Image (cartoon, rainbow, N blue to C red):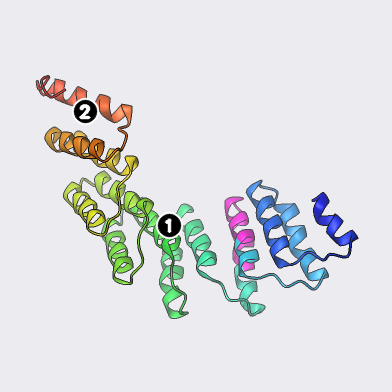
C-alpha cells in the first residue's frame, strides 16, 4: 500500500488495473473491509471498476460468507452497464454450488447462454463439481459432453471431479469410459485421476482391474498414493492372492 499512495503523491494516478490487483490481494487475505474501502475509493477518484474488479470482490464476499453483499454487487454491475463475463459467472456458480444452492447455480449457468456469455473451463468445472456434490452425475456427464461438443477442452481437474463422482456412485464403467475419452483427445490422467478409479475398483473387490490400472498409471509415470497401494495389497491378501500383492 505504501507504493500505492506514493503513486498518488507523485501525481501518478493508479488505474483500474492497479485497484483490481489490490482489491484481489485484500480479498485473498480475507480483508474485506479494506477491499471494499478501495472499491468505493475508485468512485471518489472517478475510476470506473470493470468486470474484473467486480468479480474479485464478489469472490471475496462469497468466500467470506457474505452472500447478500456478493449478489448486490452483481446486480449493481447491470445498473452501471458493466457486463459480467465468464469469470464473474464462474465465481457466482461456484459460490452457489458450495453453498448448497444448486438450483441457483443452474439458473445462472444456463442463463449465460441466453446472454451470449460463453462458459469457460472454470465455469464448467465448478458447475460439474456442484452437480456431482449433489449426486447429479447424469446431468454432470451431460454437461461434460456439451462442453466437448462446443469445442471446450476440459482440464484434468474437470474429468477427475466427474470421475470421482461416478466412482462414488459405483458407476465404474462410466468412469473408465471417461478415461478412454481423455486418451482419445490426448489428455493425460494424473495421479489423482488414477488413484480415484483404482480406489473405486478396490472398494467393490475388483482387484484385477485395480491392478491393471495400477500398471497402466505406473507405465505413464504417475505415482500411486501409498494409502491406495496399501489398500490394494490388503485386498489381494484378503482374497488369498498373495502372489499378486
Q: Which residue is at 66% across, 46% downward?
A: 29
Seen in the picture, residue 223 relative to 182 is either above or below; the reply is above
Q: Is residue 67 magenta?
A: yes
Q: Earlier in the sequence, mark 2 or mark 1?
A: 1
Q: Is residue 4 visible?
A: yes
Q: Nearer the viewer, residue 111 or 47?
A: 47
Q: Which residue is at 80% across, 55% downward?
A: 4
Q: Which quadrant holds residue 62?
A: bottom right
Seen in the picture, residue 99 relative to 51 is either above or below; the reply is above
Q: Nearer the viewer, residue 195 or 7?
A: 7
Circle 1 residue: 126
Look at the numbered disc 1 and give the secondary structure of its residue: helix
Residue 82, percent from left and from top: 62, 76
Mark 2 vs mark 1, foreground winner is: 2
Q: Which residue is at 18% across, 36% downward?
A: 210
Residue 170, percent from left and from top: 21, 45
> What's drawn in magenta, residue-wise?
56-73
- Tell me the number on the disc at residue 232: 2
Q: Answer few, some or many: residues within 10 Å of disc 2's Cα (few below 14, many 20 plus, some between 14 and 19).
A: many
Residue 106, percent from left and from top: 41, 66
Amino acid at each position: 500500500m505504501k507504493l500505492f499512495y506514493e503513486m498518488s503523491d507523485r501525481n501518478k494516478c493508479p488505474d483500474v488495473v492497479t485497484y483490481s490487483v489490490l482489491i484481489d490481494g485484500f480479498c485473498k487475505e480475507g480483508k474485506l473491509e479494506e477491499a471494499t474501502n478501495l472499491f468505493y475509493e475508485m468512485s471518489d477518484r472517478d475510476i470506473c471498476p470493470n468486470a474484473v474488479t467486480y468479480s474479485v470482490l464478489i469472490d471475496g464476499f462469497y468466500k467470506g460468507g457474505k452472500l447478500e453483499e456478493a449478489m448486490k454487487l452483481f446486480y449493481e454491475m447491470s445498473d452501471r452497464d458493466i457486463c459480467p463475463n465468464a469469470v464473474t459467472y464462474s465465481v457466482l456458480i461456484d459460490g452457489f454450488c458450495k453453498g448448497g444452492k444448486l438450483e441457483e447455480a443452474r439458473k445462472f449457468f444456463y442463463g449465460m447462454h441466453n446472454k451470449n456469455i460463453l462458459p469457460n473451463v472454470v465455469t464448467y468445472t465448478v458447475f460439474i463439481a456442484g452437480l456431482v456434490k449433489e449426486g447429479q452425475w447424469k446431468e454432470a456427464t451431460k454437461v461434460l459432453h456439451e462442453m466437448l461438443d462446443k469445442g471446450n477442452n476440459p482440464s484434468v481437474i474437470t474429468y477427475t471431479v466427474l470421475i470421482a463422482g461416478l466412482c462414488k456412485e459405483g458407476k465404474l464403467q462410466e468412469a473408465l469410459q471417461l478415461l478412454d475419452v481423455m486418451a482419445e483427445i490426448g489428455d493425460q490422467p494424473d495421479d489423482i485421476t488414477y488413484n480415484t478409479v483404482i480406489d473405486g475398483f478396490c472398494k467393490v473387490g475388483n482387484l484385477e482391474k485395480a491392478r491393471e490400472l495400477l500398471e497402466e498409471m505406473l507405465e505413464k509415470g504417475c505415482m500411486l498414493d501409498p494409502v491406495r497401494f496399501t489398500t490394494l495389497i490388503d485386498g489381494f491378501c484378503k482374497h488369498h492372492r498373495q502372489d499378486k500383492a
